[in-house]
Amino acid sequence: MDRFQAKLRSFFNNKWLVFVAAMWMQSCAGIGYLFGSISPVIKSSLGYNQRQIASLGVAKDLGDSVGFLAGSLCEILPLWAALLIGALQNLVGYGWVWLIVTGRSPVLPLWAMCILIFIGNNGETYFNTAALVSCVQNFPKSRGPVVGILKGFAGLSGAILTQIYAMIHTPHHAALIFMVAVGPTMVVIALMFVVRPVGGHRQVRLSDSSSFTFIYSVCLLLAAYLMGVMLLEDLINLSRKVTTVFTVVLLLLLLVPIIIPLLLTYSSDDTSAQEPLLTVPQKEEASNSGQSTENHEVILSEVEDEKPKEVDLLPASERQKRIMQLQARLFQAAAVGAVRVKRNRGPRRGEDFTLMQALIKADLWLLFLSLLFGSGSGLTVIDNLGQMSQSLGYEETHIFVSMISIWNFLGRIGGGYISEIIVRDHAYPRPVALAMAQILMAIGHFFFAMAWPGTMYVGTLLIGLGYGAHWSIVPAAASELFGLKNFGALYNFLTVANPAGSLVFSGLIASGIYDYEAEKQAHEHHNWTSLFRKLLYEAQVQEEKELKCQGAVCFFLSSLIMSGFCIVAVAFSMTLVYRTKIVYAHLYSKSQK
């Protein structure tokens, strides 16, 4: 009995259990990606026009991107408390919207609806922050794979939730809003005591790389399975039983990663070999010299200056040993005053910047503007995908919402993988991968503008891949150019580009053009039916109130404009590539030797 309790305790404190639980939580955390399916329900129920729906979309994007409060609370409160706050925000925000749409609560003005959408969607910032903080602390040597997989599952959550909604098979479309309000809340509350730091740096195993490979395989299998299911549901009228079977298989695939912590806990003994870890100096040691902490940040550049050139030709283990010996000598010499440490007036690219220091650098603004035009245009497509597909005559709009969620997931996984090859194998700036993603998006927007048969599928593919790649490339590039010390502040600043781009493209351009074309079509229809005005008066009033636009003209001009701005984003990215060639050559050329 004691042995079983010890195993159970070991399982509950296993870092891989925390990672798997965080994956499950992230699989329902990307509720903002369902706005393309929710917005037509809100539009028809409340009689909104496209500009009003675009305002709700901007509120959704702001809620998704403004994570300063969530980050602060995760540092002050236990993670379970922060997760509970996020779950309550999700329940109150979207739950109230559901009550309004179904007529159970009085209709609120547009500004109040925007606040509800903001509150509901802001809940996912708590889910993302708690998952990333706990897992990065548990996997300090594998931050890239951990962040990529968690962000990927957040991007895949739209397709997962849509498939579960298809299994419910309710004729009431407002049920999707109810599921968004209740489903993620239940999952997060169930897992909030599991997702936490558990001292994962003391659980490093030789099998970790194999475990990550297994997780990647499950992710790709999950994406391929979802894509196949969605295509079948679009091409064939599947029965409810078949849809239920497909959904059950999907849920089983989500459960498969739990095998890793189970095997590590119950199939290996407690004395399994662990990789040696670097010791961290204690605070007492750091306080022995008043200048040691102050000199720590600048001593690294002194190591580069004093290091003999032949050190770079040594094997990795020997090179690291020689560098540590040289660093120790420099620390000792600086402590007794034998060496005067050089002090720069500010950090150089590749070193640690504060947000205020980075804000005066052209590189940060090039990255910000590139992200604004690239991801902003992609987010506009995600928010308006329901209206775009309806205008072209597609009835099942949720199919495209699910597909773009899958391509978004693969874009995040593939963007990080390809950009890592570029920097590791070729020592070339990572933003070149960003430019490649933006070229794909420019082509995707062009396909949406042309509205040829089948272009909805091609455009969804290209926009999803390109948009997802932004969120695996930009954070990595920011950490390389401006350091990791203040990465949280820098990342939160860059995420503001998402709602800012959505405000420009969706709130001003796409919605304005859509409403103009809808009004134009309504007046044309009114003129053709003027002889029957009295008989059809009420129908016409309702038609003009809803302002529905039909045909390729609805998003033709806005798609062309966004395609052009993606080309501008490519120019910004390539300018950044030109400016940072030397930086990346310095950062990664040694890794090739």
Image (cartoon, rainbow, N blue to C red):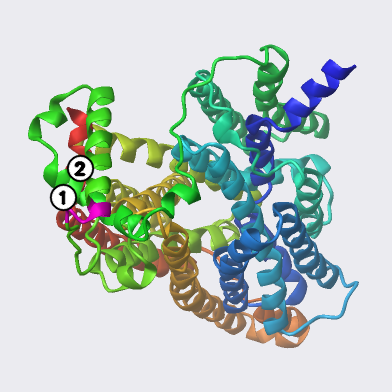
Position of residue 307 relative to residue 395, above or below, is above
Q: In this view, does 332 lie to the left or right of 399?
A: left
User: Is there any visible trace of residue 560 in the rendered image?
Assistant: no
Q: What stretch is highlighted in magenta?
A: 334-339
- In the picture provided, is 519 more to the left or to the right than 481? right
Residue 480 locus on image (x, y percent)? 31, 50
Location of mark 2 (residue): 428
Does residue 514 appear to the left or right of 95 in the view shown? left
What residue type is disc 2 on?
Tyr
Residues at circles 1 and 2 in contact by the CB criterion of under 8 Å: yes
In this view, the residue in front, 418 or 486, is 486
Residue drawn at point x = 43 percent, y = 69 percent:
501
Residue at 66% x, 34% y: name it: 20
494 in magenta: no
Quadrant where the image shows the N terminus: top right
Q: Mark 1 points at which residue?
A: 581
Residue 493 image position (x, y, % from top left): 44, 67
Q: Earlier in the sequence, mark 1 or mark 2?
A: 2
Q: In which quarter of the image is residue 343?
A: bottom left
